[in-house]
Structure formats: structure tokens, C-alpha cells
Amino acid sequence: MSLPVGHKTYMGILLVGVAIFSMLLWRSYVGVLPLRSDSPAPVAVEVAGEVPAPGIYLLDRERAVVSNALLAAGWNGIAADGARKLEPGESLVVAKTEDSFQVISGRMKASSRLALGLKIDLNSASVEDLMLVPRMSFEFAAAIAKSRIEKPWENVEDLAKIHGIGPKTVLKFEDYLEVSPWGHK
């Protein structure tokens, strides 16, 4: 049985397309290197301000110090606390003063932290920040912010004290919220 000329052309194009798709799929699969389970996760740090290449950088845990983060952003000045270890989700802003530069340390924006898989702090997140958490209602976010005025949160499990937040919801929120051990906002 012979196919008409139009069908042969269609089948040829289809076979070439499948072959190209298969080759690209294979190349993308081979190009992905598995993560080593014995290597610690990198430290995500944001560098902003008066640097040539502001952005978020992933640093090896052993080399995650202020001077290396600034160097990654193209700044080769000297920071007073250059040897200080960085915490995941930390933000460094290089600000120009009258005659020098100052490196100001803080925390990344909540949206950046959550996008990187990092948690946000119950005691410093705004209502708007808390609203970025999946399944967080405005009422819950407002209650969290209001409650910490009277007494700072000691752990995420205490969220169960808020009317409407049960143990299952607390478990879901634990993936996104923390009580930070360091006081940066």
C-alpha cells in the first residue's frame, strides 16, 4: 500500500520533528548533573547597592562570608566585617557615605526568601509578607501581626492559638514560617 505524496511529506516532517524533539530531550536529561547528597546546600545571599552586579548569589557554605559575597557582585572594596559568616537569606547593601562605603546587613525581601525556599520570620514579617504564604488568609496574617505586639512568637506551633488555625494548618505553615534566631528584619 502506498501513501499519497502529501501524506508522505507529512509523515517525513513528523518523523524529523520527533527525532529532533527526542535528541533535545536526551541532551537536557544528560546535561543535568545529580546533586551530591553529601554536599551542604549553598547559602543564598543578596547583594545590592553600589556594586557592579547586584543580585542573589549562591555561595558554598564554607566560603559564605561577607567579602566573598561582595566579590561575587563585582565589588572589590574592603568590608569591616569581611570574614563574618553569612546566614541563608541575608542581604548586604553597599551604601556610599561621604568619603567611604558602608556595608549594611539585613534580610532579603520575603518574596525572594520564599522563592528560594527559605522561610520568613513570624516576628518581623509584615501582613503583606505573610500573605505570600500559601493558604494564608488576611485574617490569619493580621492576627499573627497583632499577637506579636503583645508577645513575640517563640515558635511556629504557637500559631494554633489563633482562632481558625489548627494543627494541620500549622504543619503547612511550618514549611514557610520560622522564628528567626537572628534579629535582622
Image (spheres, rainbow, N blue to C red):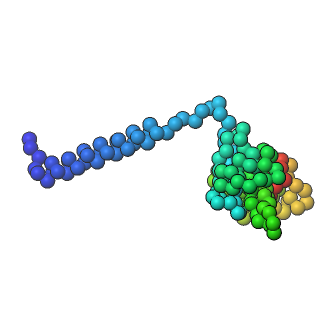
Assign the N terminus to one quadrant of the image.
Answer: top left
The total of numbered circles placed on residues is 0
On the question of residue 128 being in view, the answer is yes
Q: Nearer the viewer, residue 137 or 71?
A: 71
- Where 78 sits versus 60, above or below? below
Give the x, y percent position of residue 43.
69, 45
Give the x, y percent position of residue 141.
75, 61
Q: Residue at the spot x=76%, y=64% of the render?
A: 95
Give the x, y percent position of residue 49.
71, 63
Give the x, y percent position of residue 142.
78, 64
Q: Residue at the spot x=65%, y=47% of the render?
A: 58
Q: Residue furthest right?
A: 150
Q: Residue at the spot x=20%, y=47% of the render?
A: 12
Q: Residue furthest bottom?
A: 98
- Where 70 sits versus 96, above or below? above
Assign the C terminus to one quadrant of the image.
Answer: bottom right
Q: Residue furthest top?
A: 38
Q: Is residue 10 left or right of residue 65?
A: left
Q: Residue furthest left?
A: 1
Q: Nearer the viewer, residue 120 or 97?
A: 97
Q: Residue at the spot x=35%, y=41% of the render?
A: 23
Q: Nearer the viewer, residue 35 or 171?
A: 35
On the question of residue 165 being in view, the answer is no
